Amino acid sequence: MLDEIVTMSEIKLVAIDLDGTLLNSKGEISNNSVVEIQRIYKMGVHVIITTTRNNFYVCSFCEELGILDPFICSNGAQIYSKPGGTIWKQYTIPFKVASSIAKLADKNNWELSTTVNSIIYWKQRPGQKLGMVRPNIVIVEKNHDALSEEPLKILTWQIEAADALEKLCKERFSTLCKTEVYYNPTGEFHSFGIFPVDADKGTALDYVLQKLSVDRKNVMAIGDNNNDLTMLRVAELTVAMRNGTMEIKKMAKVVAPSNDEDGVAWALKKYVSDDKNL
């Protein structure tokens, strides 16, 4: 039944998550995935990268893939017209929210990763030098030192910090920011993110569809983690990776092989073949 539905509904746009989906466990894109993405892109199918990563990471992967479509980064806080292009949409965390988060983290010596514009600020660890350690990454003495402007996102990999910051956000700032918890395929905690209240992959993808005049019935979305759920709600054909969380596999219409088994290439080859898009 699914094959019949997809055959009738021509795929014109594919939204693809990066970590745990397009990227394998080594953080690389397989040759098969590159081939399949280039194939559908040359057919005229839009390939939209959607990720929690920052824009400069996405631009690098888009260059590797040879695509110039819009992309979504920082979990929907930024939408770009294309690699190196203009920002179509941007949301930030209000300064009073970010300041409270940073002060609580500094009080407890928790490490945050704070993104402001295109710069990631990391709290200094013992022995680290302050300042820029590589392009787009700066070490600061305190988390609060990162807040020259309102940030796009704040991340932590410490579970103690995640628990306390989630409580802070829900009790004091529930209308001003939103939180996301990320899990490993085995279900253990991986990381925690704080984002602008209006930022999520689904809202961002819907905006891109409007800009490109693409109907939801012509969209495939592929993801692996719970922050991809909003993106899948926007698409007709929904694909979860085998290494994904239980929640996303339950929601998806298709479960593809894992990110280490060319799951994205498998899905594109199966559901976006040339004869379906003539």
Image (tube, helix red, strand yellow):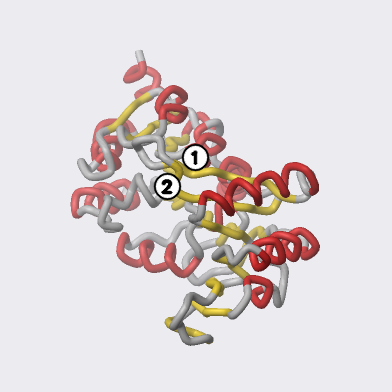
The answer to which of 157 and 240 lies nearer the viewer is 157
260 vs 133, left or right, is left
CA–CA distance in space, label 2 to label 1: 7 Å
Quadrant in the picture for the C terminus: top left
Residue 161, position as x, y percentages in the image? 58, 54
Given the image, on which type of amino acid does mark 1 rest? Asp
Nearest the camera: 149 or 252? 149
Q: Secondary structure at mark 2?
A: strand
Which residue, given by chain and number where applicable, does mark 1 sit on?
A: 228
The spot of residue 102 in percent (x, y) is 68, 65
Check the picture and name the quadrant holding the N terminus: top left
Residue 120, compared with residue 247, is above or below; it is below
Report crowding for label 2: few under 14, some 14 to 19, many 20 or more residues within 10 A (C-alpha): many
**Residue 269 visible within the image:** yes
User: Quick one: label 1, few (<14), some, or many (20+) residues within 10 Å?
Assistant: many
Question: Residue 265, located in which quarter of the rendered image?
Answer: top left
Residue at the (53%, 72%) spot, across then down = 122
In which quadrant of the rendered view does residue 10 lie?
top left
Residue 2's x, y, as percent?
36, 18
Q: How many labels, in total? A: 2
Q: What amino acid does circle 2 point to? A: Asp
Q: Which residue is mark 2?
A: 17
Verify CB contact (< 8 Å) between mark 2 and mark 1. yes
Seen in the image, is 271 located left or right of residue 74? left
Q: Residue at x 44, y 83 (%)?
A: 127
